[in-house]
Amino acid sequence: MGNNFSILHKDKDSHSRLGELKTLHGSVVTPAFMPVGTQGTVKAISPKELEECGAEMILSNAYHLYLRPGIEIIQKMGGLHQFMCWQRPILTDSGGYQVFSLALLRKVNDEGVEFQSHIDGFKHFLSPETVIEIQEALGSDIMMPLDECVHYPTTKDYAEVAMERTLRWARRSLLKKKENGQLLFGIIQGATYSDLRKESIKKTTELDFDGYSIGGVSVGEPATLREEVIDLVSNALPQEKPRYLMGQGTPCDIIMAVEKGIDLFDCVIPTRYGRNGTAFTSQGKLVVRNAAYSSDSQPLDKNCSCYACKNFSRAYIRHLFNAEEILGLRLVSLHNLYFYLELMRKIRDAIRNNRFLEFKKIFLSNYHED
Amino acid sequence: MGNNFSILHKDKDSHSRLGELKTLHGSVVTPAFMPVGTQGTVKAISPKELEECGAEMILSNAYHLYLRPGIEIIQKMGGLHQFMCWQRPILTDSGGYQVFSLALLRKVNDEGVEFQSHIDGFKHFLSPETVIEIQEALGSDIMMPLDECVHYPTTKDYAEVAMERTLRWARRSLLKKKENGQLLFGIIQGATYSDLRKESIKKTTELDFDGYSIGGVSVGEPATLREEVIDLVSNALPQEKPRYLMGQGTPCDIIMAVEKGIDLFDCVIPTRYGRNGTAFTSQGKLVVRNAAYSSDSQPLDKNCSCYACKNFSRAYIRHLFNAEEILGLRLVSLHNLYFYLELMRKIRDAIRNNRFLEFKKIFLSNYHED
């Protein structure tokens, strides 16, 4: 496969790196955060607002779109980019994670996975090949192969079975894939067992994917185990390929992972917390629904330049949540996305100037996790 | 009171007229439609989007804001305009209608009205004077006095009692009002009894308000009776003052009322239907949730230039509603507001060019009410 990733600069004092990932819909400078648009929309946010926040790439989900509205409809509308009016890069998750967390009555074997839709109970069968076909029909810029994601805790025996099946499916995905410019990433599995992770890395990277993602994290394991896995995997992955930490995380998680050399992130946290009235700020999380803010004329974050912070007080946004007005969750979702994307801009600037660790220190001294 | 309204042009062939209404926050060219922001936000829409749709003035509600978040908070935030980030004119409804439709356990007497909050059951008392004080604290551009709004059907005796109380309250409202540039409109009551309506008009217009509104319509009466009331009242109101038809209506209702000489409208229909997946188009209503649109690549209305119509297909918007995604109701609400505001722009152009009746004929020949 071609060389779609180049490292622009490596930080002197950490594993963090500045990279450029080329896709069919343009380039993305990494480390980058992808807002999550599971069902073909980033929840409560318009594509125009996403662009204004500086989103460069978003994530969507092949499993969800396959079930609803169905791939045929999206194809008729000219593909996923045109369907959802987003002309920048899209990464589609295969839905392996969703099949193993949302779907009912799963039967997994080497052929693939049979399951019942979480929406209407209808039976479906997905193989590694159909999952590639679906993502080719969607026209996403980066595809993910079907994998078997196991939850924590799991026996080592089962973790090994799932890891090896993921590998066999990875090979079949590569064979199925057309040479049409869509990228395909490999997924590292192996649960919290370091020898399984190492084997998964060795055999997956032999297959020469366009990038590698760390799967099977944030599946219930303690944070310390998760950090160990991220450390192990990112150290062992090839330098010249992009590294994607799936489904992560809080601002602190992201900074920690960038330090270990991760390039790509996605997470529902900014929009999910936004809908719930919790804002991320330079000082930490702020629950704007709290009575303490009922006559607070300050913006969510005085250091923020987003539309919500430039125009509205905490008191107003709190009122909107109290009155169950949709603008409330819109404003906090928008602010949180802006906060995450601004964090990534600051991270990239810091790497560019060889001061990532200094940035990390200052950020963490202001930001209080609770 | 000063002359805040001037008629720029009268249509040759109908009672429709082009006017300019001057307020503390700028001028509004009439006939104008006010999007409804009951709780200090037009549901699901940001102030920036309202401006982009061309909204010139919005309506909010003193009763709702008094109950939540409370007037003191809005005052602390610098008044309603600053609180909700809307720098153009705001008309506040007094909440008379809400006290008589939403609130519990009402006791009405000449002093005012005692009621229980529909939110938390706490008891409150509002007099004509406190309602003026509330709206002066909010800083709205146009205030409405407390009135007694009776539902259809009602006895003539009670309609007379309510009409006369509304008159006494109107006089007290004028006495209470500061001379600070905020305008105050009178409200014509009298239910569907033409002699009561005439008496209400005679005695209310003697008081020299800045404008007059037709209250007590759309309270359950048949459309033909409503039309008769609007006809009677708008014919009898002074030419030189703005006329406001409260809480109306469908596109056809508005066109009919403009023809009778009405200048101002407000209605929840565009946003309420928008949240429900029903779009107003030049051909009539379109229920975009319907299966018929599941792979329809057309915009909601091919003749519309709003953000939703320039960027998204019916198939996509239908998918958003099916998947319960907030962007769906945002896009249809936005489209409907744009449709209403564009209708008003077309109406004003038609009046300016003495071709209102021609415009009406063409509009109605394309627009199918169901």
Image (cartoon, coloured by chain):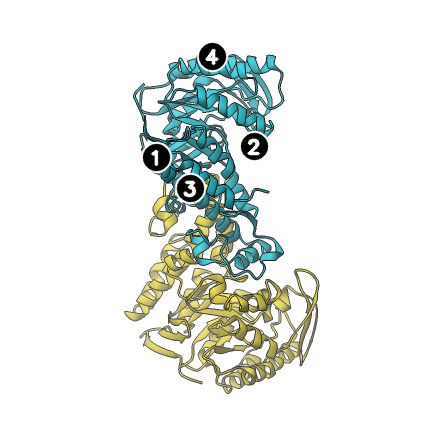
Chain colours: A yellow, B cyan
> In what element is the residue under mark 4?
helix
Residue A160, compared with residue B172, is above or below; it is below
Compute the Cα span from label 1 to label 2. Answer: 36 Å
Type of amino acid at the residue the image marks with label 4? Arg
Question: Would you say the residues marked 1 and 3 are in contact, meaning their CB atoms lie under 8 Å apart?
Answer: no
Q: Is residue B289 above or below residue A149?
A: above
Q: Are marks 1 and 3 on the same chain?
A: yes
Can you identify the residue that label 1 sits on? B29
- Left or right, residue A124 beside residue A63: right
Chain letter behind tag 2: B
Provide residue B220's location: percent of width, then percent of height. Answer: 60, 28
Q: Amino acid at mark 1?
A: Val
For marks 1 and 4, give the one nearer the viewer. 1
- What residue is shown with label 4? B168
In terms of sequence position, does the residue under pointer 4 or pointer 3 come before the other?
A: 4
Label 2 Cα neighbours within 10 Å, binned few <14 / some 14-19 / many ≥20: few
Which residue type carries mark 2?
Ile
Camera-near label (2 vs 4) is 4
Question: Circle 3 sits on which residue?
Answer: B341
Image position of A129 (left or right of A237) = right
Q: CA distance from mark 2 to mark 4?
A: 29 Å
From the image, tell me which residue sits under label 2. Answer: B119
Q: CA distance from mark 3 to mark 2?
A: 32 Å
Q: Earlier in the sequence, mark 1 or mark 3?
A: 1
Percent across and percent down for residue B180 are 31, 23
The 10 Å Cα crowd at callout 1, few under 14, some 14 to 19, many 20 or more, is many
Kindly identify the residue that appears in the image at 53 percent across and 27 percent down: B227
